[in-house]
Amino acid sequence: MTATDRPNILWYCTDQQRYDTIRALGYPQVRTPNLDKLIGRGVAFTRAYCQSPICTPSRATFLTGRYPASHHVHRNGNAYFPSHEKLVTKILAEAGYDCGLIGKLHLARAQGHERRTDDGYRLFAWSHHPMPNLDPEHHAYFQWLVNEKGIDPHKLYENLKGFCAAGVPAELHQTTWCTEVALRFIEEKRDGPWMLSINPFDPHPPFDPPPEYLSRYDPETLAPPLYQESDVERQRMFRDICQQAVEPGNPHGTNPREGTGEGFIELAARPPSEFNGREVKAAYYAMVELIDDQFGRLVDGLEATGQLDNTLIIFHSDHGETLGDHGQLYKGSRFWEGLVHVPLIFCWPGKLKEGLVSEALVELVDLAPTVLEAAGIEIPGNMQGKSLMGLLTGATDPQTHKPHVVCEFNDALGSTRQIIPTHATMYFDGRYKTVVYHGEGLGELFDLQEDPGEFVNLWDDPGMKDLKAELVLKHFDAIMATSDAGVERVGQY
């Protein structure tokens, strides 16, 4: 493939978006006409899993094509991203791509501003989150509000004090800003291909969609979170496991409007113990609909500039959100489907299959090698992901990719009320899911075929003893395989 034949790459990654938020995939409670159209033009994976339910380790994984056990970027709040790990964006830049970032990166500590690594981005329009407490010199969304909209960001956000309530209007929203900057980037004149990574903060908490979007969803018409009374006692077993929700909450309560704290950490990382799950869902779905509208503008922009047919589009999220399931909000060292199972869509008109919905087990670690293969660039030997291009083009069975997926949490959160250095791992073979909380004497075993809501933990069921032993062995083999052999061998001794 020559440089002129290489596709442009539009890589759109949302933050904390669950798998069950796209109407065309069987979830009619949220309106996503543009993502539905993208699926009709491309390939959607219904069983895609992140390698960590936390932002930084997940993003480090899909940007390096390497598992957390190998890249060692396990925590949010890291002092820096290790210089010996090479991002796929840097590889693309070295191959002649003009690379840009808009929104969140989060490979290292992001308070004030984020220390950059050698990332390959020519455009670096950074905005970790929309709130105005970041360093204005580095906060591109802040600058846009001030310089282009004539808005004081502090005044715009001063009334945002609840974890679930209407936020700023759509025309001033960070998701809209992402689109505005992206359209300028794709319309630039250039000789070679481009790669644009767009990373809005939504639908990450706080759940604060524009009021005009929130008004489109009636909480009373929405299904409640997955919850049974038994969840309260069951989740108390995990009080010493690191998670943002310290105790299981009551998803059938009321949403507190006051007393939930102020500031980014209190609003975005420390949920209340009582909430109305339907109201939370309404706000969350409204945030997803805004994303869908703004994503649609980008696809229209590609079409208007004659670039759609030569652009590989990727849409996914870094991890999910518990959204009230089992009395939990936000994220932590838990591995519910809502938290580890993410949307994943590819589109490249004329090059990939159209209207294909694949049930193959895939992982976000597979994204980097997929991008490189699509661009005709050699995949480095230390990349551990497995390219999806065979499935995407129809060269291989579109319903088969990997026998299992894995996920892990390794002392990953520093924003919780209790800092607990939890280490846990998950293995899922498409039916059975095992979770081991290492050093805690706790485990989970779910049969998702019979129990898709993950209500019945079979870990201590005597009738599952033999199957559990078999699954635990496979679990540890799979986790061990995520650690690479290290430096390349060039001699015999």
Image (tube, rainbow, N blue to C red):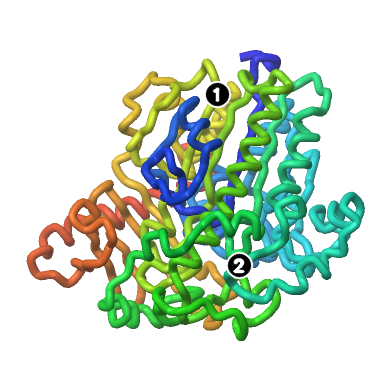
Kindly identify the residue that appears in the image at 45 percent across and 30 percent down: 43
Q: Amino acid at mark 1?
A: Trp
**Above-or-below relation of 443 to 218:** below
Q: Is residue 198 left or right of residue 450?
A: right
Look at label 2 and name its amino acid.
Answer: Pro
Q: Residue 212, which numbered label?
A: none
- Marker disc for residue 348: 1
Tell me how far mark 2 sits from mark 1, CA to CA: 34 Å
Q: Nearer the viewer, residue 119 or 23?
A: 23
Q: Is residue 168 above or below residue 51?
A: below
Q: Position of residue 113 (x, y in %)?
A: 78, 62
Figure quadrant of the N terminus: top right
Point out the frontmost of discs 2 and 1. 2
Q: Can residue 317 be seen in the rendering of this structure?
A: yes
Residue corresponding to mark 2? 206
Label 1: few (<14), some (14–19) or many (≥20) C-alpha neighbours in 10 Å:
many
Q: Secondary structure at mark 2?
A: loop
